[in-house]
Image (cartoon, rainbow, N blue to C red):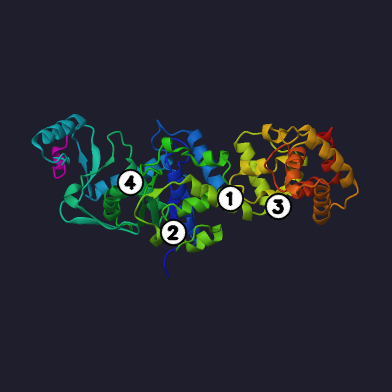
Amino acid sequence: MSAPVVTRFAPSPTGYLHIGGARTALFSWLFARGRGGQFLLRIEDTDRARSTPEATEAILKGLAWLGLDHDGEIVSQFENADRHAEVARELLAAGKAYKCFATPEEITAFREAAREKGESTLFRSPWRDADPATHPDAPYVIRIRAPLTGETVIRDEVQGDVRISNDQLDDMILLRSDGTPVYMLAVVVDDHDMGVTHVIRGDDHLNNAARQMMIYDAMGWNVPVWAHIPLIHGPDGKKLSKRHGALGAQEYQVMGYPAAGMRNYLARLGWSHGDDEFFTDDEAREWFDLSGIGRSPARFDLKKLENLSGQHIAVTDDAALQREITEFLAAAEAPALSPGQQEMLGRAMYCVKERAKTLPELLEKAHFALTSRPVEPDEKAAKNLDPVSRGILGELTPQLQNASWSRENLEAVLNSFAESKDTKFGKLAGPLRAALAGRAVTPSVFDMMLVLGRDESLARLSDAAA
């Protein structure tokens, strides 16, 4: 029986949750959740100058919005520094690492000389095989003994076998002269101690894998399954950056994309399951596997995101959608809906969910249910309330007083009234939309009248006719 799957997401808290990081977290989450495994979270906060509590909070908020829950406590890499140093000293004691007394100035001078000669600038420490009796009483770093011959093969689930000649690997520093561990060591020790079985991360870390494998091998630890995923590019094929628009996951929440739509879209960025574009969370968890990840960079396409978001809004349970709208308004620092508006939105949901690609679009469609009298028409709607149209509304309103308030009866009354005026119902629609919603583009007139109810509908029509 194979060991349970354990994945991790390990962001550096130096800014928001980047869209690329969000996808990495999603892939790791889907892979673990689909196999009954664990998804762990580690904050790689060893860079004390750049790590901030605010950035950590932004990352956690981004993950929470996306619904990517993690197992166990959040691990702080910085707090594990003593453990990382202990491993470096263990390798030193075992002869798999050594003390190097070369100064930064000596290393720089070596590299400059090598550059001038056109030779490799890979530093080979003269202390690698030095007799400990010759060690000076001076600061030193601890370096790992890299293999000098042969090759290192990174067996990657996405990239295939990646071969690196060992003569390209340097004796990597494990512990700095001030006793602090380097990032490469910290990552390996933390992944081992956390029991991580699969490392899913960006392919910009691919070269790091060869160097990290030296530590796994030296410690006799199992190497995790690697899956290095291509980066996300903009529509122009260049690495995703600010010029392509929003980069942070939470920015998309503020723009009003539903979390389910964002999850669906991010899952399709570089991974596929046949020709399926739209799928549920349950389907994503069931289908997701590493073999479905492509080797080419994915292109971020806002139109596709909007399309998927619209499909998810349309099928989301009304109550869940209302909760998401509440969270969206809070994230966007917009006024919250009153209890009365919440109730009206719930009544209107059936006729505003269709074809809204974002939550602001949905709220705009629901404007008729959220606004109160007197309804202020916008510029386009006001054009439909000229004196003739007002007169028509004045004649129509009494005929609706005694109508049974059902779609069938309302359609009959309005069509009959249109006939009496020798016109089509379509000609009445503009003034009715303006009166009921103050907008030129709205749900159907009948849906609005049913949602608003008899008294409110008649009151709005009377207001507009006055």
Q: Of marks 3 and 1, which one's residue comes earlier in the chain?
A: 1
Indicate the secondary structure of the residue bearing disc 1: helix
Indicate the secondary structure of the residue bearing disc 3: helix
To which residue does mark 3 refer? 350
To which residue does mark 1 refer? 310
Label 2 vs label 1, nearer the camera? 1
Q: Amino acid at mark 2?
A: Ser
Indicate the secondary structure of the residue bearing disc 4: helix
Label 3 vs label 2, nearer the camera? 3
Binning the other alpha carbons within 10 Å of mark 3 as few (below 14), some (14 to 19) or many (20 upward) gives: few
Q: Of marks 3 and 2, which one's residue comes earlier in the chain?
A: 2
Q: Give residue 272's mark.
A: 2
Q: Residue most toward the bottom?
A: 1
To which residue does mark 4 refer? 204
Q: Is residue 70 in view?
A: no
Magenta region: which residues? 127-136
* Of the pair 227 and 244, the residue shown nearer to us: 244
Q: Amino acid at mark 3?
A: Tyr
Residue 210: give x, y in percent of width and height. 27, 51
Question: Contact (CB < 8 A) between labels 3 and 1?
Answer: no
Question: Contact (CB < 8 A) between labels 2 and 1?
Answer: no
Alpha carbons under labels 3 and 1: distance apart: 14 Å
